[in-house]
Amino acid sequence: MMIKVEQIKKQLEALAQFNATPGVGVTRMAFTPEERQARDYLRREMEAVGLEVYTDAAGNMFGRREGTDSMAAPVMIGSHLDTVRHGGAFDGAAGVVVALEVARVMQERKLATTHPVEVVVLTEEEGGRFGAGLYGSRAMVSDLSVELDKTDADGITQRQAMQDFGFDPERIGEAVRKPGSIKAFLELHIEQGPVLEKKRTSLGIVETIVGIRTISVTIHGRADHAGTTPMEMRRDALVGASKVIVAINEIARTIGNQTVATVGTIDLKPGAFNVVPAQVEFTVDLRAPAEGLLVKATEKMERMLGQVCGELGLEYVWDQRLGVSPVTTDKEIVELITEIAVAKGFSSRKMVSGAGHDAMMMAKAFPTGLIFVPSKDGISHNKDEYTSKEQIYAGAMLLKEAILDAAIVTEDSLQSVT
């Protein structure tokens, strides 16, 4: 029942070719030609393995391997394919191809399981296009129809993008899964941090995933001539934004307790060297391991924004695009995969995930586990992102054994291959 790590490597390399920015990292946004190419490739790979492929109303794609009890809730494994701009080839994609390899092994060995097993490709996890991530997994636990009018950098709404991609956005509510309809969800992901590598540990077993707030802030001032407008008469939106951005950094540092805040994008208008900026829009990514910390930081930041804008005669819009509370993974699954790691001789450690993953949404409704494999130098969201095939192999073996346990391999089929 061997995992073929060369097959995983081959599929990762193939997926990396579906990319809007060749040579400068991987850029594959949701509902784009690059994502369609990646989906088509994976559909063919799933079908070649013998999985039944279908897509839900939110755009999530599934490859189903039937169980002996077709009415039993499926065990779901997978991750996402979308990337940040100029990202890496492993973030998300590694979890998808490892899940597919596990399904291939089960098919090859003709293992019968009581529960169906489904490989899932979840869409728009990063939020790189429409600004609200974890979209596919959130759509499986709640109706997201109210979010479909969010726009990308070109002014295209998610509603329009879905229609152009071949989906009916009016049916998105059909993607919601009822409690109990999924027995368990397991996701393998690269760590995206340095802990496992620095500790020389093969596997991370996540117990807690931090909460996330994604906020868009727009500050409005007035465009004036840079040479003729006295300093005391200006309403400079960029000066206000600069004060706010520095204060956001200090607020996160002061609150502490693993609270982090990042201003990752900034856009100003009219953007001329001799015009006082009239408008600045920037994003805030706020994360913390406890809901109280998120609330405290959010309140301080919005209050500070109002104070700065009031002093400078500016106006502002505060738009929270994503709000996800911290979650814990399923204790039984954590203990199961810990025991498997020990039995297989892999070093492991229980840990907190500082990055958000689809597992954090699935955990709100279904028993969920999240497995980390190391990231070289802790690098991620970067073209130099890398995890060795040996490290991926360890994660794949752990995931395989966990799935065989969760889906319940029938005794007859197990004896037939031993």
Image: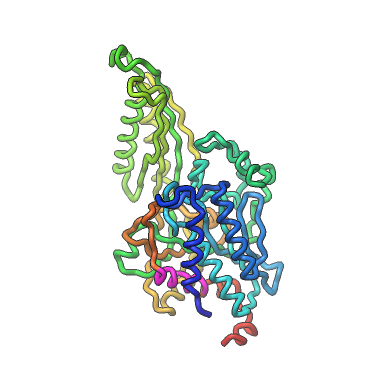
The image quarter containing residue 168 is top right
Q: Position of residue 320 (x, y in %)?
A: 48, 37
Say left or right for 389 vs 36: left
Q: Is residue 106 above or below residue 177?
A: below
| Residue under the image location 54 percent in, 71 percent down | 102
Q: Is residue 305 magenta?
A: no
Q: Is residue 350 visible?
A: no
Please state the total of marks drawn on the protein image.
Answer: 0
**Residue under the image location 46 percent in, 67 percent down:** 9
Quadrant containing the C terminus is bottom right
In the rendered image, residue 394 lying in the magenta stretch gets the answer yes
Residue 261 location, quadrant: top left
Residue 280 occupies which quadrant of the picture?
top left
Q: Which residues are magenta?
A: 389-400
Q: Residue 41 or 400: which is nearer the viewer?
A: 41
Residue at 50% across, 39% down: 321
Residue 70 in the image: state x and y as whole percent: 71, 69
Chief secondary structure of the magenta portion: helix
The image shows residue 348 at horizontal and vertical percentages of 38, 70
Q: Please determine whether, in this image, residue 2 is positioned above or below residue 212.
A: below
